[in-house]
C-alpha cells in the first residue's frame, strides 16, 4: 500500500512512543489519510507537521477534538485544549495518549469530469420531446468538518476521490436535468446559453456539496448534444434560411432535377423531363404572390354553352350583356336611339337610359301631355317644351 506517514519512534521506559506525526506521500486521488500509529501512543510534546494543502484533525472516540492548519505544532496541553478536556486530564499530558489523527487534503480537485450516461428528456416547442446528452467538468475541495469524517471516512484508513465522485456525478446530473426543465430554453438556443445554465446549476449544487462536507468551487457545462435527426432538422432549417425560404429551395431543387433529366438521353429521360417540368412550374407558381399568379394565368375561354353576342363590325364573340366589343371596342348596343339626357345609345322603345337612368318619354311640364321626340311646343297647351 506504500508509506503514508513518517514516524520516528523512541523507547522510553520500554514503551514505544511516537514523537513525529506527518504525511509526506501526498498521492493523487487521496482525500483523507488516517495516520497509522499501530497501537502506539503519542508522546507528550510530540511534533505535528502539517504541510501546505493539508489539515490535521484529531478525533477522540468519534469526536473531533482539534483541527490544525499548515505548520509545525507541539502537542501539549497549551495547544490541544479541547482534547485535554475530552480526556479529563487534570494535569495535562503528563503521560502518553492515544487519538486518531486524520490528514485531509484541502487543495482544489481540478477538472473532474461529469456527463449524462443516458439521454435527458426535454420538452421543446419546436421539436416536441427531445433527447439530449451533456458533459462538462467541476472542481471542489474537501472541508475539515465532522460530517466528512463521521459520514464518509469512518474506520477507513484511506478515503479517495473514487469513494465520493460517483455520488457527486449522480447529484450533478440530477440537478442539471431539473434546472434544464425549469429554465425551458428552446433547443435551438441552448448553445448560446451555456454560461447562464452553468451559473444556475452551480447555485443549486452548492448546498448539496456542503451537506457532504465539500466546497463546490466551479461547475462548467461544456457541451450539449442533440439527437442526429434533430441536428439534421436544424441544419436543414438553417439552409432554407440562407436560400431565402421554402419556395426558393423548391425552385432550386426542381431546376437541378430538370438538369439531371436533360442529361439522361432517351425516352425515359424526356418523360422524366416533362414530369419534372410540370413540378417546376408548380413550384414557381407557388412562389408567386396571388397577384402574380393571376397575371401569369391566361384568360380562360368562355364555356361552349355560354350565350354570346357577335360584334357587327369584327365578328368577335362577346358576352350578351357586353356594352362594347372586346375585339374592336365597337358599341354592342342596338343602333337605334340616343338618350335624351346623356346622348348614350339606347335600344328602340327603351323607357329609361341604361347609363344615366333618365326616363325616355318627354312630357309637357305644364299639362303633362306626352311630347314627340324633338317637339318644341306642347300640342295640347302650346307650352314651350
Image (cartoon, rainbow, N blue to C red):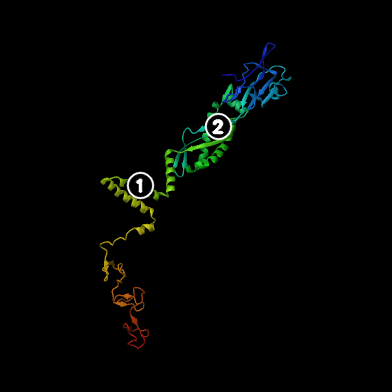
Locate residue 155, reporting x and y percent: 59, 21
Question: Which residue was labeled with disc 1?
Answer: 256
Location of the N terminus by quadrant is top right
Q: Does dot 2 land on a helix, a strand or a loop?
A: strand
Q: Does dot 1 land on a helix, a strand or a loop?
A: helix
Locate residue 299, reporting x and y percent: 32, 61
**Residues at marks 1 and 2, CA–CA distance in whole angstroms:** 51 Å
Residue 172 seen from this side: yes
Q: Residue 202: name its quadrant.
A: top right
Q: Nearer the viewer, residue 217 or 327?
A: 327
From the viewer's perspective, tell me whether residue 47 is left or right of residue 358. right
Location of the C terminus by quadrant is bottom left
User: Against 332, is 121 above or below?
Assistant: above
Q: Nearer the viewer, mark 1 or mark 2?
A: 1
Question: Which residue was labeled with disc 2?
Answer: 111
Q: Nearer the viewer, residue 174 or 32?
A: 32
Locate residue 213, reporting x and y percent: 60, 30
Furthest residue toward bottom: 382
Which residue is drawn at the image coordinates 33% and 80% (left, top)?
361
Q: Residue 351: name its quadrant.
A: bottom left
Amino acid at each position: 500500500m506504500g508509506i503514508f506517514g513518517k514516524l520516528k519512534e523512541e523507547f522510553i521506559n520500554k514503551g514505544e512512543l511516537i514523537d513525529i506525526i506527518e504525511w509526506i506521500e501526498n498521492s493523487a486521488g487521496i482525500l483523507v489519510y488516517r495516520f497509522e500509529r499501530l497501537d502506539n501512543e503519542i508522546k507528550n510534546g510530540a511534533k505535528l507537521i502539517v504541510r501546505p494543502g493539508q489539515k490535521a484533525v484529531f478525533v477522540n472516540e468519534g469526536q473531533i477534538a482539534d483541527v490544525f492548519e499548515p505548520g509545525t505544532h507541539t502537542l501539549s496541553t497549551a495547544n490541544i485544549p479541547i482534547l485535554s478536556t475530552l480526556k479529563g486530564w487534570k494535569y495535562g499530558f503528563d503521560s502518553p495518549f492515544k487519538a486518531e489523527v486524520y490528514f485531509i487534503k484541502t487543495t482544489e480537485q481540478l477538472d473532474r469530469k461529469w456527463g449524462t450516461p443516458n439521454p435527458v428528456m426535454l420538452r421543446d416547442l419546436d421539436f416536441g420531446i427531445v433527447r439530449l446528452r451533456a458533459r462538462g467538468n467541476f472542481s471542489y475541495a474537501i472541508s475539515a468538518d465532522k460530517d466528512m469524517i463521521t459520514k464518509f471516512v469512518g474506520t477507513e484508513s484511506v478515503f479517495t476521490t473514487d469513494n465520493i465522485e460517483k455520488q457527486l456525478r449522480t447529484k450533478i446530473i440530477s440537478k442539471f436535468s431539473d434546472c434544464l426543465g425549469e429554465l425551458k430554453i428552446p433547443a435551438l438556443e441552448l448553445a448560446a446559453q451555456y454560461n447562464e445554465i452553468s451559473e444556475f446549476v452551480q447555485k443549486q449544487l452548492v448546498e448539496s456539496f456542503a451537506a457532504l462536507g465539500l466546497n463546490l468551487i466551479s461547475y462548467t457545462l461544456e457541451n450539449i448534444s442533440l439527437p442526429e435527426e434533430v441536428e439534421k432538422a436544424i441544419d436543414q432549417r438553417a439552409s432554407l434560411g440562407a436560400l431565402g425560404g421554402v419556395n426558393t429551395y423548391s425552385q432550386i431543387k426542381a431546376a437541378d432535377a430538370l438538369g439531371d433529366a436533360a442529361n439522361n438521353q432517351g425516352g425515359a429521360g424526356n418523360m422524366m423531363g416533362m414530369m419534372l417540368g410540370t413540378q417546376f412550374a408548380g413550384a414557381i407558381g407557388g412562389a408567386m404572390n396571388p397577384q402574380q399568379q393571376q397575371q401569369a394565368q391566361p384568360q380562360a375561354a368562355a364555356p361552349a354553352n355560354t350565350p354570346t353576342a357577335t360584334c357587327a363590325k369584327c365578328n368577335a364573340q362577346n358576352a350578351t350583356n357586353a356594352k362594347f366589343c372586346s375585339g374592336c371596342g365597337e358599341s354592342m348596343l342596338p343602333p337605334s336611339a340616343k338618350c335624351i339626357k346623356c346622348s348614350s345609345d339606347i335600344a328602340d322603345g327603351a323607357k329609361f337610359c341604361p347609363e344615366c337612368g333618365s326616363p325616355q318619354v318627354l312630357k309637357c311640364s305644364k299639362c303633362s301631355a306626352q311630347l314627340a321626340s324633338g317637339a318644341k311646343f306642347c300640342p295640347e297647351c302650346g307650352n314651350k317644351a
